Each structure stands twice: as C-alpha cells, then as structure tokens.
Amino acid sequence: MNISSGIKDELRRFCESFAEERIYRIKNTIKGLNDSLNSETKSSAGDKHETGRAMIQLEMEKLGNQLYEAEKMGQVLTGICNPAITTKVGLGSLVITSDSAYYISISAGAFKKGATQIYCVSAASPIGKILLGKSEGQCFDFNQKNSCIEKIL
C-alpha cells in the first residue's frame, strides 16, 4: 500500500468533519424535540399527553448522552499531535498493515481516496487496543487473521 505521510492531515480533517457533523445533527434533533415539548399543549387526552412528553424526554436524554460522546470525539482529536517520527503505535498514528491501514483517532469509518482506503478507528476499539504500543514488524491476530505492521506514520 503506497501511502504518504501527508495524508495524515487529510485523515484528521476527515475525522474532525465527521465529529462536527455528528454534533450538528444531534443538536438539531435536540432542538426539534425541545420545540415539540414546548409546543405540546395540555389536551383532554391526559395520560396520552403525559406519555408523549415522557417519551420525548427519554429521547432527549439519549441524545444528550450521544452529544456528550460526540463532543468527547472532538476532544480526542484536539489531543492528537502528529509527531514526525514514531516507533510505536499511539493516538494519531497511521498504521499500515499487511492487510489494511488504520488511523488511530476516533471511530469515523473508512476514509477513501482513489484506491486507498484507511479505517479511522478509536484507540478503544478492538483493533485499536491490539495495535496500541506495537512497533513496525510486529504481527498480531485480528478476526482470526494474522497481520503484520509494515509501517507507522
């Protein structure tokens, strides 16, 4: 896999965009639910009205948790520094293995550029946990498949 170290800036922007878009969507959904909650008028339905309000509030709680997690993604990205030379996999590392490429940052899915595909994964993800602290040349098993680290950028 022919990947240059300059791609790390693109990967970071991809992850930042992913986190910002997620935060934006969640905030808009919360705003919509708030508007629904505020515009809901007391009707003769009684229990039905209260059940509807309770369901909206439960949904808002779930969205609040999702917003918290999305904001944590942004904080993780803020904490990533891209050192010129790394010998061990850490946060911000671009890891080229015999099978795939991984950018250790946040779980943002696959970044695609031409024929190149790089998976943006969290350090807390199963593959992230396996790769952390490893060096070039080290091999590991993941999903019943053996791979070796060819390069760390």
Image: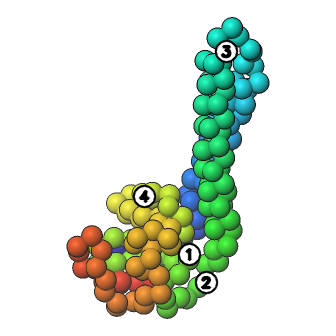
Q: Is residue 13 visible?
A: no
Helix, strand or loop for disc 3: loop
Task: Return the residue at label 3.
Answer: 46
Looking at the image, the residue that sits furthest to the front is 47
Q: CA distance from mark 2 to mark 1?
A: 9 Å
Helix, strand or loop for disc 1: loop
Of callouts 4 and 3, the N-terminal one: 3
What residue type is disc 3 on? Answer: Gly
Left/right placement of residue 52 relative to residue 93 reads right
Q: CA distance from mark 1 to mark 3?
A: 54 Å
Of callouts 3 and 2, the N-terminal one: 3
**Do the numbered discs 2 and 1 sit on residues whose CB atoms are within 8 Å?**
yes
131 lies above or below 15: below
**Do the numbered discs 3 and 2 sit on residues whose CB atoms are within 8 Å?**
no
**Do the numbered discs 4 and 3 sit on residues whose CB atoms are within 8 Å?**
no
Q: CA distance from mark 3 to mark 2?
A: 61 Å
Given this view, does label 3 or label 2 mark the residue nearer the observer? 3
Helix, strand or loop for disc 2: loop
What residue type is disc 4 on? Answer: Ala
Q: Residue at x 41, y 65 (%)?
A: 118
68 lies above or below 57: below
Task: Return the residue at label 1.
Answer: 92
Q: CA distance from mark 1 to mark 4?
A: 15 Å
Task: Return the residue at label 2.
Answer: 83
Left/right placement of residue 140 relative to residue 94 reads left
146 lies above or below 32: below
Q: Quadrant of residue 83?
A: bottom right
What residue type is disc 2 on? Answer: Pro
Task: Return the residue at label 4.
Answer: 110
Given this view, does label 2 or label 1 mark the residue nearer the observer? 1
